[in-house]
């Protein structure tokens, strides 16, 4: 049996000026080629977990890290983000905050150039990653002209140019519509089938349910439990509790009749309109449009 690619044992993380542990006793393993879905309420430490696995914490963001964390046999805390380049790739939820270069091809080339790879190799990797993410033909486009969904694809493509063993995705569909979100997960599925090890934080769990080999549920106190399937998670934690955490369950798990308005405030099943107008009038100069 292959040894786990990711091993976490009794991980505790606390930030400066606080005695509270954001993550408190987190333990799990991820084998090569698996996709682990991470869920939990806002502020439970999901992003902190990914930042710790990527070496961003504590090398770039100060924090106290206790316990064992290994990624491909290496210590993220000791090697840091730069030391893990090519081993771990991380994509954040807001694509607007991730791009640096003006054009799509330049952005995809940036990671390889940053590692001083040969120019021909940099271009080859960039073009290959752009094609994989359906962005071939966009190389000369300015990044700012892309839709949010295409920007998120570009962020993933840029990370893939370094061919990381482990891909960390922090709510990759948070800022895009459902159609674009499904396309992102179609591409994530292709990456998984190619052998990538993936850990993804997601609140739209129906998108990742069929791809997930296990589900890591982090509670508001920073503790966690690992479940083999979404059904097991729902049976243990309960529909109402998960809905209150802002986790969007598929309809078969969370029919609207089971939930009240307060519990579905963050759910697509919510009956209360998100936007409502009545007798709206808009005036331009002297002309009124009703």
Image (cartoon, grey):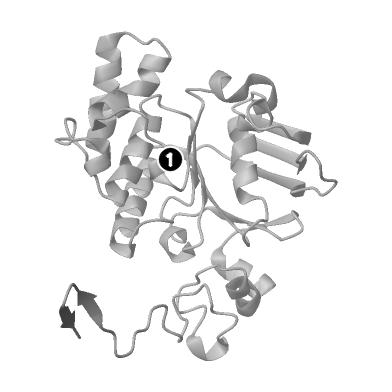
From the viewer's side, name the closer residue of 274 and 21.
Answer: 274
- Determine the image quadrant of residue 108: top left
Percent across and percent down for residue 277 are 34, 85
Outermost front residue: 286
| Residue highlighted by disc 1 | 97
Q: Residue at x 31, y 43 (%)?
A: 151
Say if 190 sits above or below 114 in the image: below
Percent across and percent down for residue 103 are 24, 30
Percent across and percent down for residue 175 are 40, 56
- Determine the image quadrant of residue 145: top left
- Determine the image quadrant of residue 95: top left
Q: Residue at x 32, y 8 (%)?
A: 118
Is 137 on the left-hand or right-hand side of 272?
A: left
Percent across and percent down for residue 212 are 49, 54
Is 19 on the left-hand or right-hand side of 139?
A: right
Work out which quarter of the rendered image holds the N terminus and state it: top right
Observer able to see residue 1: no
From the viewer's side, name the closer residue of 230 and 78.
Answer: 78
Q: Residue at x 82, y 45 (%)?
A: 18
Q: Residue at x 75, y 55 (%)?
A: 223
Helix, strand or loop status at disc 1: helix
């Amino acid at each position: 049996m292959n040894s786990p690619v990711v091993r976490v044992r009794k991980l505790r993380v606390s930030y400066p000026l606080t005695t509270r542990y954001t993550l408190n006793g987190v333990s799990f393993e991820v084998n090569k080629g698996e996709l682990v879905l991470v869920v939990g309420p806002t502020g439970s430490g999901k992003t902190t977990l990914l930042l710790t696995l990527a070496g961003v914490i504590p090398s770039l963001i100060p924090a106290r890290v206790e316990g064992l964390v290994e990624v491909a046999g290496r210590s993220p805390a000791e090697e840091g983000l730069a030391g893990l380049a090519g081993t771990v790739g991380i994509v954040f939820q807001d694509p607007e905050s991730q791009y640096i270069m003006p054009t799509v091809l330049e952005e995809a080339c940036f990671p390889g150039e940053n590692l001083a790879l040969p120019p021909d190799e940099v271009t080859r990797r960039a073009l290959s990653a752009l094609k994989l993410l359906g962005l071939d033909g966009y190389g000369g486009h300015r990044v700012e002209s892309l839709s949010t969904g295409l920007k998120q694809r570009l962020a993933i493509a840029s990370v893939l140019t370094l061919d990381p063993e482990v891909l960390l995705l922090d709510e990759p569909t948070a800022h895009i519509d459902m159609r674009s979100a499904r396309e992102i997960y179609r591409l994530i599925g292709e990456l998984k089938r190619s052998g990538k090890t993936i850990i993804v934080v997601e609140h739209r769990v129906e998108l990742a349910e069929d791809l997930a080999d296990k589900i890591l549920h982090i509670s508001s106190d920073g503790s966690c439990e690992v479940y083999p399937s979404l059904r097991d998670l729902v049976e243990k934690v309960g529909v109402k509790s998960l809905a209150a955490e802002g986790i969007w369950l598929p309809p078969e798990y969370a029919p609207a009749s089971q939930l009240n308005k307060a519990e579905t405030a963050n759910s697509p099943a919510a009956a209360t309109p998100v936007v409502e107008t009545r007798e709206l009038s808009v005036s331009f100069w002297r002309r009124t449009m009703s």
